Image (cartoon, helix red, strand yellow):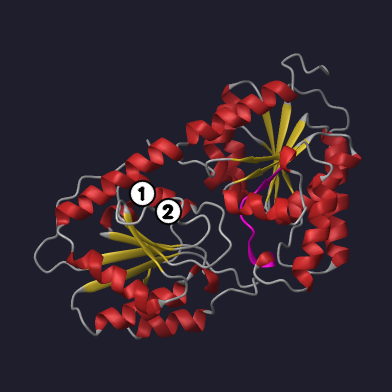
Amino acid sequence: MIPNGSPHNRLIAFVSNSAWSLYNFRLDVIRSLIGQGYEILVIAADDEFSSLLVSEGCRYVPIDFNNRSENPWQDFRLYRQLRKIYAGYRPDFIFHFVIKPNIYGSLAAAACSIRSIAVVTGLGYSFASKNWLYRLVRILYRRALKRTTAVWFLNNEDAKMFISEKIVPIQKMKVLPGEGINTDYFSPVPKTGPTTGSPFTFLMSTRLLKSKGIGVYADAARILKKKHDNLQFMLLGFFENSHPDSISEEELRTWQQEGLVLYQGFARDVRPFLGQADCFVFPSFYNEGIPRCLLEAASMEVPIITSFNRGCKEVVLNNSNGYICKVNDPFDLADKMEKMINLPAEERARMGRNGRAHVMRKFNVTRVIEEYLRTLREAVPASNEAP
């Protein structure tokens, strides 16, 4: 039930495609805002993380959401659904995340005369090729973002593309240091060093999409297993069966039967796995923002191999905290992985320390929290009256 006209103290809405993404990527921001006296309204598709957000002190409203649908009637229903929620709850300010909330949520907020910011967390599948879907999304984005207070990006390349395509004017844009990472939570664990007979362990943790480079990872494992004994290629992640880019369970089963990957399912807490890993691998060719998995690994002093891809190369400095490999090239990835295997343990530890120092300097979540607080102090007076 929508509490029409109910009183509140500086109600801020966070709108995304899933409660999971808000809990995993923005929990530190949400906690900080609650600590500063803001009420947080979460509007997202229901999943196992929605109750966790409620336990953190958020108000929660579920929405029917299909991020992969290309049905315009379903999208119009999402717009009407959001407009009804906004009109009822009357949040003082709204943050939208990912493409459909950015488009239809921004339009719904404007229809209710509520200020909002669209956070472009990455270009994603829609911008993978310049087909009809890309052209449609570009038109919709251009129309919706005219109505926002600002548009935030997570890397310079995404911002540059939106400006060059005249989707958003440069005056409206701001580039954040990614989503930020809590470097206290993701802190290094003591390395005891490899025991006799223990395998050298690579780890990849990601959504199970082809463009995240999982097939490249499996092919690199196949190459390396013909040259080296006692290697382990761990994989964490969850399937998105409705996503057109999802790998199939059959593909994954084949890789497991070949002994190429050791699939560990979805892990709510990746820290124990990062603590076991000698190297983190992420050969993505997806349109990334700033990949959270890279920030987590670097913050825990795990050396990284990633592709020369937008968002990825901002986190990994080649030869400093890891290696950069060619995009969608399993042979070059295998070469970089072999270099990592052959490094002395002391050199890998040095790379790990460099990675944590880089993340603390550039991607610490405190910088992101400060941006949210600065924006809300200007936009939502403490008295809850219009400036």
In the rendered structure, which amino acid carries the disc numbered 1?
Ala
From the viewer's perspective, is 22 left or right of 132? left
Q: Residues within 10 Å of mark 2 (few under 14, many from 20)?
A: many
Up/down of 235 relative to 359, above or below? below
Q: Report the span colored magenta.
A: 118-126
- Front residue of this view, candidates 52 and 187: 187
Look at the picture and state if 10 lies above or below 135: above
Residue 33 lies, in percent from the top left, at 60, 28
CB under 8 Å between discs 2 and 1? yes
Quick one: 320 or 150, which is closer to the camera?
Answer: 320
Q: Which mark is residue 298?
A: 1
* Helix, strand or loop at mark 2: helix
Name the residue type under label 2. Leu
Determine which quarter of the picture holds residue 146: top right
Q: Is residue 346 magenta?
A: no
Q: Quadrant of the C terminus?
A: top right
Q: Visible in this render: residue 350?
A: yes
Measured as percent of width and height from the top left, residue 357 is found at: 33, 40
**Residue under the point 83% across and 59% down:** 139
**Residue that carries the numbered disc 2 in the rendered image:** 294
For this orientation, the residue located farthest to the left is 196
Is 290 left or right of 43, judged from the image as shown? left
